[in-house]
Image (cartoon, rainbow, N blue to C red):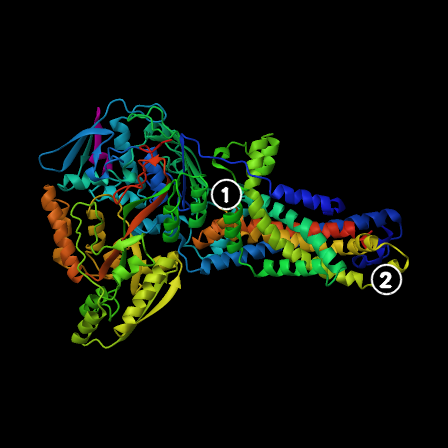
Amino acid sequence: MIDANKDGSGQGQTPPASASDRRAGRNRRLRGIAGTLLSLALTLLGLLLVTFIIGRVMPIDPVLKVVGDRATQAQYDAVYQAMGLDQPLVVQFFRYLTEVVTGDFGRSISTGQPVIEDIKRVFPATLELASLGTLIGVSIGVPLGVIAAARRGGIIDQIARVVALVGYSMPIFWLGLMGLLLFYGILGWVGGPGRQGIIYDGMVPHVTGMILVDSLIAGDWAAFQDAFSHIILPASLLGYFSLAYISRMTRSFMLEQLSAEYITTARVKGLSERAVIWRHAFRNISIPLVTVIALSFGSLLEGSVLTEIIFSWPGLGQYITKTLLAGDMNAVLGGTVVVGVCFIGLNLLSDLLYRVLDPRSK
Amino acid sequence: MKHLLTPRAILLASALAIAPAAYAETPADTLVVAATIDDIITLDPAQAFEFSGIDVTINLYDRLVDFDPMDLEAGFQPSLAESWEVSEDGKSITFTIRDGATFHSGNPVRAEDAAWSLQRVVKLNKTPAFILTQFGFTPENVEEKITFEGNKLTLNLDKPYAQSFVLNCLTAGVASILDKEAVMANAEGEDMGNAWLSTNAAGSGAYTLGGWRANEAVQLAANEDYWQGAPEMKRVVIRNVAESSAQRLLLEQGDIDVARDLTPTDVDAVREVDGLKIQEEPKGRILYMGLNQKDELLSNPAVIEAMKHLVDYEGISDSFLKGIFVPHQSFLPKGYLGALDENPWTYDVEKAKQILADAGVEGGTITTKIRDLREYIDVAQTLQASMAEAGLTLEIEQMTGAQVLDAYRAREVPIFLGEWGPDYSDPNTNAATFAFNPDNSDEAQATGLLAWRNAYAVPEEMGAATEAATLEQDSEKRAEMYKDIQRQYQEEAPIIPLFIRVANTGLQENVENWTSGGTVTNAMYRSVTKGE
């Protein structure tokens, strides 16, 4: 609380007593939260506006998706009006915003369902996939990066570099298909495309929508194994791509730390190399690393489109792409809001972790 | 966080990653189908008009008349209507509804349900409604035109249409008979159950709806009380699998019984696998080339004639379209009344050159829009090459399907490559769109007619012949009339049928009696069996 005064530039006057000091601190924190919320709302608004405009200028006719190729002009016009497309853009956008505020994302024209229902169905699928992918990426990528930096130029460093290079340059659909062919088609180690084997389809009661979690809740071990055998390959694929990024970032963060003075000091003090690396250097890089991991998780959430298509994974990436190509703006905007909220949420979270992990903020 | 990163944890993770999968063979009483089903937007028969949507509804509902999946050639057969009579003046048909058929709810199928279902289509007036409204029904008059009494249902038509024409239309998905009580109990406002039926079903068909998750799967369960006997497959699961290679892998691994969208390469591969088979069936979809008559060059009859000789029919269907398209140069698919099995044009660049030279056409450039689908782009590029030899330049802009369709409906595509599938199983379906265009003005906005989209002013006598053919009671004469129209069409029309699609379905060897519906209808599961 004493520190709060130092950077309390907005306060104008020095608070004389500790009671008002606390009040000022609370006010500032509240204002901080309000500010965060405001910028969050503005970010979302901007996101929606840009997506909306892109959707409207896109040369795709959403009405045709609804009425099909064979409709008469009268049927076409009726749907055109029902969708509100005869209104000026500003009116359409404003109307959409008012609906969104009340939690109504409208109806998707590609599925005929309320967008919110669609998202409830597809988002857990992607969340499950991206989480496991990130978990794999982190648990391999971070140690790989650390070791690569510690033994710079060594064999592990070379391997890490090749792994990262391949991860960047290999087309994901090709790798996915090859993976399917090898591990499912030839070796038979994993399940095929889809989230579950047919016999388990719809057997596990829907709780979170994430089948791994739901089958554990239901205590259905066989369903869990089945779901795991289906998710492991696409998740490993995504994990590989995130590990390529994470290991490279870890390595460069680590190299930077290892050349710092305090490391030399620690070594001079006779600390073991292991302690130097893990206790000192790693501790310091864990802070920027959190941001890297959060960003990588975010990009898996929105960027797993090809993986989802190859593995027939009915998730958000597939949903947004399909609806975008159909000019289905309610669905695209709904999906965008979800991705946007996730990114903002991840940013907040990594901010928060920053504060927890960074000793200077204490 | 630290404990996550120990070597032991990594080892454990990789051990989990290669743990053998629990395998799921398809159960003996379940049919598992992989197909691209992301086109479904509703399961209401009055509205569904996408391939996959109709594939589902055709199994959930019965119609007054229907196909026998084991004998599609036989045409329409009695179904919920056990018999029918045509009045003397030919303007009304009275159906007798069969006794003992029940809906999935247990309600008996009544003439009242049938009349209400057909009226509902006309009143809702969704896209496929034209299949019924072409007989003179309007939302205003339909209650007087479609009537019932006891177990009799009467359709009062505005003209003495050919009986085969009316009955063929009644085999279409839009003519499905719905359980009035069940639907109306779930109606919202004036929608006559439209919203509810998009994800629910109230039919009397061989299957009940287990559930539909958009872009994911459709589940059907056998109707044990089906009036034609319970189907052998107790469960049908249709999984959305977009990739042909994924479908093939699933089939090879025994995780699915049927793969419906295999590319030529995968078809060849599946043929080689023990325990699998490929079933070839002609489909009704015609790949055609539309030459827009608004284009000065393309409206020249010599250019139209020359273009017919610039398509390498055999070369294309033997190479990149191998197995999925075969040459077909008339607008009716095989299997239709009056279908013409004559392919008069051959690939002949010299002849095309001669035709152009005789007419004094010296070169020219056409810029067109092509859908960015491998098949169409390949065809367009082959055409581009042969046109170049004849001194014509073709410039191709690739676009998404939705974009091209949009421009096509606005009459803005000079050379259109696309497919047309019949809407119902009567020859009029294609005749009325390829060879009928009563008003060729921009204002007419007859966007549903291919002739209009290509600005083809169909000659008056051809239009009249197309209308007359719908009224001819003698089926043989009627067939001849369609043959004549097609021959004349081949002579002069700027819309040129090129190929017809072939369905290549990959099946487990034990799957018997599978049908994709041939050229006339859709996939029907009630006949399917699985041997040992």
* Magenta segment: B141-152
Q: Chain of mark 2?
A: A
Q: Is residue A265 left or right of residue A295?
A: right
Q: Chain of mark 1?
A: A
Residue B283 visible here: yes
Which residue corresponds to the image point at 69% horizontal and 59% vertical from the top-left? A249
- Residue type, label 2: Thr
Q: Earlier in the sequence, mark 1 or mark 2?
A: 1
The reply to whether dot 1 and dot 2 touch (C-beta < 8 Å) is: no
Q: Is residue A35 left or right of residue A173?
A: right
Residue B146 belongs to the span the image colors magenta: yes
Quarter of image, res B93: top left
Residue B400 belongs to the span the image colors magenta: no
Q: Secondary structure at mark 2?
A: helix
Observer-nearest of B18 and B244: B18
Observer-nearest of A34 and B220: B220
Position in image of residue B220 (x %, y %): 40, 33
Per the rendering, the mark at residue A192 is 1
> Dot 2 corresponds to which residue?
A264
Q: Is residue A105 left or right of residue B138?
A: right
- Residue type, label 1: Gly
Position in image of residue B37 (x %, y %): 40, 44
From the viewer's perspective, is residue B446 above or below residue B272? below
